Image: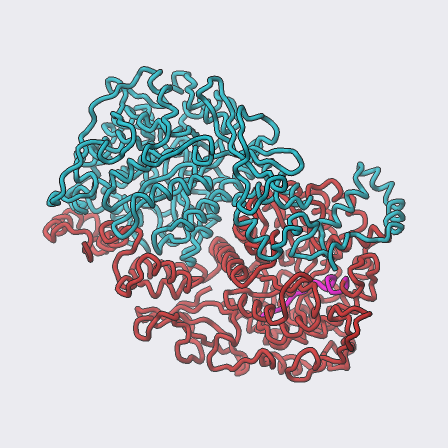
Chain colours: A red, B cyan
Amino acid sequence: MTNKDARTPASTQDPTGTSENGEAGKSIGWHKAYVEGTRPDLRVPVRQVHLTNGQSVTLYDTSGPYTDPLVGTDVRRGLTPLRENWITARGDTEEYEGRPVRPEDDGIRHTSPRGGLRNLDAVFPGRPRQPRRGRGGRAVTQLAYARRGEITPEMEFAAIRENVAPEVVREEIAAGRAVLPANVNHPEIEPMIIGKRFLVKVNANIGNSAVTSSIEEEVEKMTWATRWGADTVMDLSTGRNIHTTREWVLRNSPVPIGTVPLYQALEKVDGRAEELTWEIYKDTVVEQAEQGVDYMTVHAGVRLAYVPLTAHRKTGIVSRGGSIMAAWCLAHHKESFLYEHFEELCEILAAYDVTYSLGDGLRPGSIADANDEAQFAELRTLGELNTIAKRFHVQTMIEGPGHVPMHKIKENIDLQQEICEEAPFYTLGPLTTDVAPAYDHITSGIGAAMIAWWGTAMLCYVTPKEHLGLPNRDDVKTGVITYKIAAHAADLAKGHPGAQEWDDALSDARFEFRWEDQFNLALDPDTAREFHDETLPAEPAKTAHFCSMCGPKFCSMKISQDIRREHGGSRTEIEEGMAQKSKEFAAAGNRVYLPLTD
Amino acid sequence: MTNKDARTPASTQDPTGTSENGEAGKSIGWHKAYVEGTRPDLRVPVRQVHLTNGQSVTLYDTSGPYTDPLVGTDVRRGLTPLRENWITARGDTEEYEGRPVRPEDDGIRHTSPRGGLRNLDAVFPGRPRQPRRGRGGRAVTQLAYARRGEITPEMEFAAIRENVAPEVVREEIAAGRAVLPANVNHPEIEPMIIGKRFLVKVNANIGNSAVTSSIEEEVEKMTWATRWGADTVMDLSTGRNIHTTREWVLRNSPVPIGTVPLYQALEKVDGRAEELTWEIYKDTVVEQAEQGVDYMTVHAGVRLAYVPLTAHRKTGIVSRGGSIMAAWCLAHHKESFLYEHFEELCEILAAYDVTYSLGDGLRPGSIADANDEAQFAELRTLGELNTIAKRFHVQTMIEGPGHVPMHKIKENIDLQQEICEEAPFYTLGPLTTDVAPAYDHITSGIGAAMIAWWGTAMLCYVTPKEHLGLPNRDDVKTGVITYKIAAHAADLAKGHPGAQEWDDALSDARFEFRWEDQFNLALDPDTAREFHDETLPAEPAKTAHFCSMCGPKFCSMKISQDIRREHGGSRTEIEEGMAQKSKEFAAAGNRVYLPLTD
């Protein structure tokens, strides 16, 4: 989204976004600015790009305080809890002792000789805190407020980011068509809204596993992902230090954090799916809700009766959560405990304002399995669960596939919107072919752009390492950028107000050979600049009226500028003046370009 | 396309495709094989992938003799002219002296102290050759043959590649819905077909410019592009050695070569567009036709009256050819000489079987300019020219944009198909947003997949360097792979017979943890293997029944395999047996996975 010159940010500071090789005066670059709302503690961050022609373009910013040189950040202390006053002022929550943190919360086995962790202080060195929940178990969700007609500061914050009236945000949440994930125990976030009437959002997955990676790496991946535009981050850790990693991520995250509690619950029973119980699962949900997880993937749609539907699939069940629940159902030959206890789960989530992300445990894992009976049977159950969740005022989104060929994509969003009463759809890709491991950010970026155009509200990124390994820093960036492209392409196709201003500003810069502006407006300024410099490294090339593609002889942009100069009037004026202009053109030497070099 | 076990290649040799780190016995890899047609000199190359389960998968192969260890290649001698006998046997062409090669053909200025080049021997050291053309100027085009009901060896060759009957190829060419670019002076090519009823094709652009690159680099880029799957290559050279570079590329290319003759013509007038004449242009077309160029982009649709339509565009005219012609029209205030002399041009092209690629010189260069009056005015003219070309039996395809947001893409292909009587559409992307320089392979890969699904026959790739610089080797590979993904995703969505077998084979390998098979079946085996090894480098991980994403604990594929083992029967059997199986599952220790490591 751009608000080109539409709104002046409330406060600005010195430019900070000038690239490494940019110099003051030549590249004005960009800086972090804030748009103030109706109260002084409501300041919405934006990325203000300063163009060399004196204009500026305002872009949506997900990077948090890390890109503001006036704000000191320290990952050992965590971010400032900017929503704290808003939450306490509502007076509907209370602090309480909280569930004690146990060694097994961190995947430390019962037989471990190490002592247990006693409290939150032990897992995170920042300010001491007690968890908070709805007083007397009441629903303290943005959905409950919206239904009561209240516009919360969170809603106003999100509205400013989207450049819409706060009432639009409230309405969409109240109707269940949008969610604003904001656990009362995650006051650090900068609120954002997920729904088809708003900008398409992108989620980035991080998480250590039994095989590799550390706490520091995961925190760093989270800030790195949000720097490039991730709107939410899911911590899918499955290995050791699972509780502690999550605490560090939450305390340092400016974006909503999602999890799959089932992964941690399985750790607590040493990986034996059949030993899972509702009690262990519930305990894990409370543990994570107290930490501040904003949305949770719950695979309650994987019912016993659907498991056999997957037996003859090409790739069976590819969702981890789905396969765990399928294994549990089989082992006990019982209905899923998540499905059976869904209402109780709603009560818990409502008391913290944790948003449901109803998981598609039976999503297709191959082109062959797309849109099959198992997948759509589960979707119908998710529709049923969505209705129940709404009864408890729990915000809800619905997860979608997966691997789907292009001609079967639209059916997914259409069916989901119908069955789930327009609840936000949150899809993984979909991947449009299976044949390109190492390029699944692209196979899925294609499907993601299409399904987002047709109404998907949030896209879960896929990195180049999908199917092959864990994403490193570069993979996270590539995944996020690819999905920001898909999301923005969809914003354009949906005609989102203001979306095209960004493209227009960049294309103007391109046409006018304002190279630095083109770089600074790019989704990834660093790589754009680097690629340009590979071919034409010299500084004069940054202001040259040609580029390396055509060289000075063939520059079509230059010729077009000449045409515009010759024919800048109205159509009639142009046509009338053409013969005359033609003579002048010849008189001027018929040079359609200025040869800057030989 | 895959012909899984459907056809046994006529001849095979030792596996050659085993990766650097593969070892005999563990990875059987792939090798080049040939499918024989109705005559012994008609051998269609395929890539035969050998799976570890004893099956094999046959994939379309564009890489030419370079990947056949039994064929010696030498870039100084060129490839074997495999079509030579087919062409001479038709008896409708004749060799002739040919136009003398002049110094200015290589961009050597009239004032150059160096002596001129006398003949083809001087520019290429391979076998001496004289150019060939239709006897008495007759049309020796595949279209002329197809209309007469003749199935040429070229048509049969293409039909075998597509896994269709030769008659289908003939019919589609005769109807003008497909082209088989095959200049009589380019006997080295392995014939292929471009049309919406066939597999979607990908073109890769190469070419030096005034700024950078050499002859050797361009030949190497061509073989590199075809190795990764480019179906045709356009040589867009604009600098020095333009004639010689093209000769080397043609003599060594197994795929059809396209050019934009206007670029070279402009070189001959020192870059002064207004000095271009029909005579200079025609001379250049003959020069290139004699060399063997298979298809030529001709911007004959940029008419004088359309130039003012671009004056108020965001980015004017972005096509180099389009802007050159616009400049010429303005300078002289005359109708385009290409439009005026179009019939004469048809006669020349027909005598060599050069295929038209009617250029979209007024294509949009930004989201703002998509589907505007200038663009569609030119398209209507291209429809008119298409009809004329067909009268002269010249095979014709139509070029398309460019920068187009998703919701405006379908109108492009629908209108083109209607106006141009279903002539093959050949599009550049389209790019679905302007905001991601350095990632325009992705912004355009999205649009390319969609427009190909809807009927575009060939996609011109876009590399990450688009708008920024000249593509290097890595960029060429990334561009080709991205576009092969788009093309294959479209083949799937179109339901092309056999397309999904490739995906199925790879997904089977994935589900069964046949890692080496998954790599060998991948569009880019090298990168897939490299990414896997980054996280789990040890050899045992190549046969491990888990991967780095989940680790051994959570492997959903493993759990699915257990489900399949438990419930492998029919639906009824499955449901009846579930309770019983559940008991057995418990008795077996309720382990849904085999923990291969701790």
- Residue B254 percent location from the top left of the image: 40, 33
Q: Is residue B60 left or right of residue A272?
A: left
Q: Is residue A498 left or right of residue A361?
A: left
Q: Nearer the viewer, residue B408 or A68?
A: A68
Q: Quadrant of residue A542?
A: bottom left
Does residue A256 belong to the magenta stretch?
Answer: yes
On-image quarter of the C terminus of chain B: bottom right
Q: Nearer the viewer, residue B466 or A109?
A: A109
Tell me where the magenta segment starts and ends, as one range.
A255-266
Does residue A447 belong to the magenta stretch?
Answer: no
Q: Quadrant of residue A469?
A: bottom right
- Residue A254 percent location from the top left of the image: 57, 73
Residue at left 47%, top 72%?
A: A46
Can you see residue A174?
no
Can you see residue A400?
yes
Q: Is residue B442 left or right of residue A380?
A: left
Q: Nearer the viewer, residue A126 or A287?
A: A126
Above or below for B591 versus A502: above
Q: Nearer the viewer, residue A96 or A270?
A: A270
